[in-house]
Image (spheres, rainbow, N blue to C red):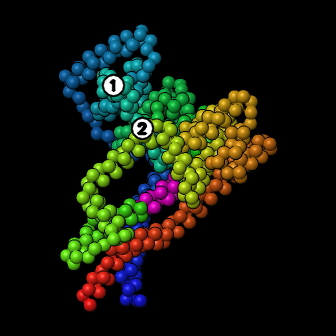
Amino acid sequence: MKVLLAPFTFIISFIKHFFIGVKFVFFDAWYNLIEYYQDKNNFKKREQHANLNEIIENNNDNEEEEQHVLSLDERNRIQLEKQELMKEMQREINSRKVSKDYYYYYGTDKTGKKVKGMMSATNKMTLHNFLANEGIDVYQVKKAGMANFLKKIGLEQDHEMSTKDLIFWLTQVCTYLKAGLTLNDTIHIMMEQASKDKKKKRLYEAISYELTLGESFSKALENQGKVFPPLLINMVKSAEATGEIIKTLDDMANYYTEIDKTRKEMISAIIYPAILLIFAIAILTFIMVYVIPEFIRIYDQAGIVVSGFTLTIINISKYITANLDVILLIAFLVIIVLLLLYKKSKGVRRAIQSFGMHIPFFGKIIIYHELTLFTKTFASLLRNSVYITSSMEILSNITNNEVYKDIMMETISNIARGEKISKSFYHKWCIPDACYYMIVTGEATGELSLMMEKVASYFNDLHKSRVTNLKSFLEPIMIVVLALIVGVVILAVVIPMFSLYGQIG
């Protein structure tokens, strides 16, 4: 009996250790490597953050710039260009243009060194005045044709700031404001620090330009397009009304830090089973394409006639081997089509998301993640006195889950009719009873913000627990399932070998 079980014991042991090796190479090693570089970057940022006060004190006298002397012909040329620039600016003032365009500017700084750059401005006059205030003697300004063309067709150059960069940016602004600097001085210092990063420098210049024109901080952020999230803009707008800008920015830094942690846990929970599933499919394909054909060749040479389940496995193997390229092409096309439909079609996206949320155990992870994001954001909005209708619009935009977006839109409609917020969450399959009753309690007591914070903490703990359990139980379950599948396939093609042993005997 032990002799007969030996091949299967070997197969199970091989699969187990193969998966352990795969897990280490493709998951643990990369995951630890990513964490190492994240910790390294965070250490550098903390080190830079610790030296902010020193940067503030020594900002004016750190280094001496070399004086650049321009030739007489070049000074005359620059003077002519400045005169032409003044005429163009006067024509723009007379035209009363209010829309913004991208401009290239050329000038010299206080040391006589040539500088150039690109900014978005209402007109050449306001851009000229802003740069003059920055100590730049501008002699030429012209429109950036390609940048303006991309803007017209909807392809803006600026993209949404990553959560990691947003957290660091908020922390920097809070630190400078707490040190007693004004908002303008804060942005100026950050602009000088980002002198080697053209993208960030252009962003800080644009914010400083808006502030110089007299715009509020929230409006300056809003005018940067998609760079800053609507949630942050609305929070800053409310903080400007209450005078708690530093506290709000500090809260938002903590908020985005927690959201980033939850997002990473969610990604970790999805990536691990996805890797295991891919390698399970790869192993089965290898067996079907390379291992079973060897058994078929042995049976044909020995004249063994197979039937039943063995014949079915052999026929499947023959079909996969003969049409492997077609199968891979079809699988690739199906994946591409599903991704495009998921991105473009709300109905398909809602169906896929709903299906995922109904998967046993794994679906709860999605639900807890969405509820943590919703309640944590809702609590922040209420705490900063953002209007309920505005809050729901923001909440419907921070999630890509169409199921919860529908609930947010229903809530807005109910509020417009004078009904309670909790009505939209009543008897919804994706809203646990605990969440609904805590919303009801918050409405009844007038402490909805506090109640949302408790709900967020509760579901965040449940989410972390589910992710931890998933990582703990998924590996042995996948190994057992794969061992059973591979064992059954191997057994089906090995059984006819016993009749061959009988003929030899």
Horizontal and vertical percent for residue 282? 34, 63
Q: Dot 2 surroundings within 10 Å: few (below 14), some, or many (20 or more)?
A: few
Query: Which residue corresponds to mark 1?
Result: 149
Q: In the rendered image, which quarter contains the C terminus?
A: bottom left
Horizontal and vertical percent for residue 138? 34, 24
- Give the structural element (helix, strand or loop) at label 1: helix
Task: Name the residue located 33 percent from the left edge and 74 percent from the top edge.
Answer: 493
Determine which quarter of the picture holds residue 71.
top left
Q: Nearer the viewer, residue 127 or 391?
A: 391
Q: How far apart are labels 2 and 1 at the CA level?
A: 17 Å
Segment tinted magenta in the rendering:
263-275
Task: Name the residue located 40 percent from the left edge and 82 percent from the top edge.
Answer: 9
Q: Does 271 appear in magenta?
A: yes
Lower sequence index among marks 2 and 1: 1
Query: Which residue corresponds to mark 2?
Result: 159
State left or right for residue 498 relative to residue 460.
Answer: left
Task: Name the residue located 46 percent from the left edge and 37 percent from the top edge.
Answer: 345
